[in-house]
Amino acid sequence: MLDPQPLKGRTAIVTGSGQNIGEAIVKLFAKAGANVVVNGGSSQDKVDKVVADITAEGGNAIGVMADVGDAGAVEAMVQQAAETFGTVDIAISNVSIRKKQPVEDISVKEWQDTINTNLNSAFYLARCVVPLMKKGGWGRIIHISGVDGFAAHVPTRTHNITCKAGVHAFAKALALELGPSGITANTVSPGAIDTARDWSQYDDPEVWRKDRIEAIPVKRIGTVDDIANACLYLAGETGGFITGEVLHVNGGQFRF
């Protein structure tokens, strides 16, 4: 029989988990038995609600407000997680900002802000959790990338495309270096997923949905649970022999 709680006793930090994909991941991981750290950077109310939802279902969760683009804030978050739950076994870098800007209109500050939030944050998290994982001889690091990082399919997103490709390169480097310590590092790349989003950065919602469904072989938009389940697969013992890889979850729209 399948283990109903494959992450029992593990502790997971998921950045940007106050909504959308991150929220789905922490809720699924809590059901799978993990202690979870719900992270947000702007909305305390959203983080509090996710924590309340998890604890109401009998799960273990704490909320930590931290700007993941701030190395000191990330270090403090990891320390709080370790003090509360004993260690950190799973780290998922999910936060990203995605603006549509022609490359000549991207200011140096906007470039640096995007790199810091979308790419540097993954390094800040990894450097803090790796010593804990090495001590326990077990760890899972997962980066949420996207089609941008592999197909560069949306114009005027140079900064995000660079970051999304970068987090997978970082995962491959970590996989090579940390494998002997029992730590895997992988990437999950979502396709078209039904999330709350800033539609000013996209086509008209109905046009976006219609165009995506026409292009996706399975003829539906993905859900946040599709991504959460992919992360659960990589985070448990089921993913123990997978490292340095990318799991594309896009309904067959892109067949890399």
Image (cartoon, helix red, strand yellow):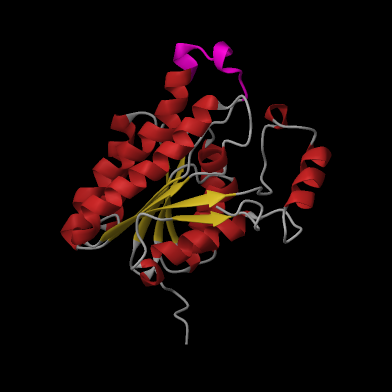
Whether residue 80 appears in this view of the structure is: no
Q: Position of residue 67 (x, y in %)?
A: 41, 31
Q: Nearer the viewer, residue 167 or 51?
A: 167
Depth order, front residue of 136/38: 136
Residue 3 appears in the picture as rendered:
yes
Q: Position of residue 112 (x, y in %)?
A: 42, 20
Nearer to the camera, 223 or 176? 176
Left or right: 230 as drawn, with respect to 243: right
Residue range (magenta): 100-110
Residue 214 appears left or right of 98 = right
Residue 119 against residue 241 in the figure, above or below? above
| Residue name at image x 50 percent, y 35 percent | 96
Q: Residue furthest bottom?
A: 1
The reply, left or right, for residue 56 in relation to residue 244 is right
Residue 153 pos. (x, y %)? 62, 37
101 is within the stretch colored magenta = yes
Q: Residue at position x 55%, y 52% from top? A: 256
Q: How far across and how far down the image is residue 149, in percent? A: 51, 39
For the point 82% across and 39% down, the residue is 207
Residue situated in front as seen by the camera: 43 or 161: 161
Residue at point 79% right, 44% down?
211
